[in-house]
Amino acid sequence: MHTGAFCDIDWDADGKHLGFIGFPYSVDRSPYYQIKMPICRIRNGDGPSLVLMAGVHGDEYEGELTLTKTIRLLEQRDVRGAVTILPATNTPAVMAAARCSPFDSGNLNRAFPGDPAGPPTWRLAHYVEHEIFPRHDTVLDIHSGGTSMDHVVCALVETTHDKARDEQAIALLRAMHLPYAFVTDNGRDSPTSMAAALRAGCIGLSGEFGGGATVTPATMAMTAGAVDNLLLALGITTRRILTDAEMPIETQLLELGGQSFFVYAEQGGWFEPAVEAGDAVKAGDTAGWLYDIETPLAAPQALFFREDGVVLSRRLHTHCQTGDCLMNLGKVLG
Ligand SMILES: [Zn+2]
């Protein structure tokens, strides 16, 4: 059984190199098939080093498009140090325009630290955490709400519980100039790319850049701005590559609360929201109404917020089942 991955990029070579990481995966229609994960490496001497990645979930298009554009526009002469760009990290999921991989139903952001002999998604995770991240200082993993969720545009970091390192990460978080930012604490052992970055010794940055299985001029502009701002803040570039000017956005710092900051469906039905992502709400305000179309004479069940906060995300699919998250609040700091 072939388990090894093949990378046709020379990590130490200066220049702009486009290639693939190949993961052998024998299938019916192609016995010697390889999943070809696209990779672009732009290196210009020693200096800071950054991984830009998108497509960890295949239906989150803001990052996939922005990094495809970055590959085309960023040249070796623009760079001090190195940038590695993965525009379609879970390649089978990206090609299927789905959150998870069609090969193994794998959710790459729940597959770290991965398994070099496991199903494809776990092999990709293993390669990213063990072969790519450790060659870099900083990682930006670009997400969004995907097909089923709308999300405010926000940046996030995982706390390292190391004050100096957290301050460095929060400075980069603010430098991206997105409307919202927050610090999370999911722990070093979690199966996410941010915990993988921590374990690999990198500063891990991530964010949600929109959602709803689409992109908009506003979400694309903010994603491009964040990439440009981060490249500049790290000293990798000295001019804007994707944008003409910095957007005048003040970042609001938020904290993720516990379960009381979420609104879940506790019965199936059809949900009508009372508020949108980005709205400020108070404890006791109505989040929305859950209808049962099969019992039209019954009043819909009203659902209420239990905390004050800003609506970070809301479910876009109206039909829901018990256990679906309908809304999530962020707690405003300061
Ligand atoms: Zn995602």
Image: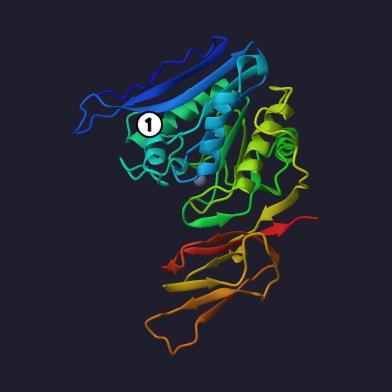
Which residue lies at the image location 46% right of the left edge and 67% below the top edge? 318
The picture quadrant where one finds residue 222 is top right
Of all residues, the one furthest to the bottom in this rendering is 297
User: Which quadrant is home to the C terminus?
Assistant: bottom right
Q: Is residue 278 above or below residue 284?
A: above
Judge the density around disc 1: few (<14), some (14-19), many (≥20) Cα neighbours within 10 Å: many
Q: Is residue 92 left or right of residue 182?
A: left
Question: How far from the left and from the top, in percent, is residue 283?
Answer: 68, 72
What kind of residue is marked 1? Answer: Arg
Residue 184 in sight here: no
Which residue lies at the image location 65% right of the left edge and 17% below the top edge? 81
The picture quadrant where one finds residue 288 is bottom right
Q: Is residue 113 left or right of residue 159?
A: left
Question: How far from the left and from the top, in percent, is residue 123?
Answer: 38, 31
Residue with the mark numbered 1: 123
* 213 or 327: nearer the viewer: 213
Label 1 secondary element: helix
Q: Is residue 329 left or right of residue 61?
A: right
Q: Is residue 17 above or below residue 34?
A: above
The picture quadrant where one finds residue 234 is top right
User: Which quadrant is home to the N terminus?
Assistant: top left
Question: How far from the left and from the top, in percent, is residue 210?
Answer: 58, 50
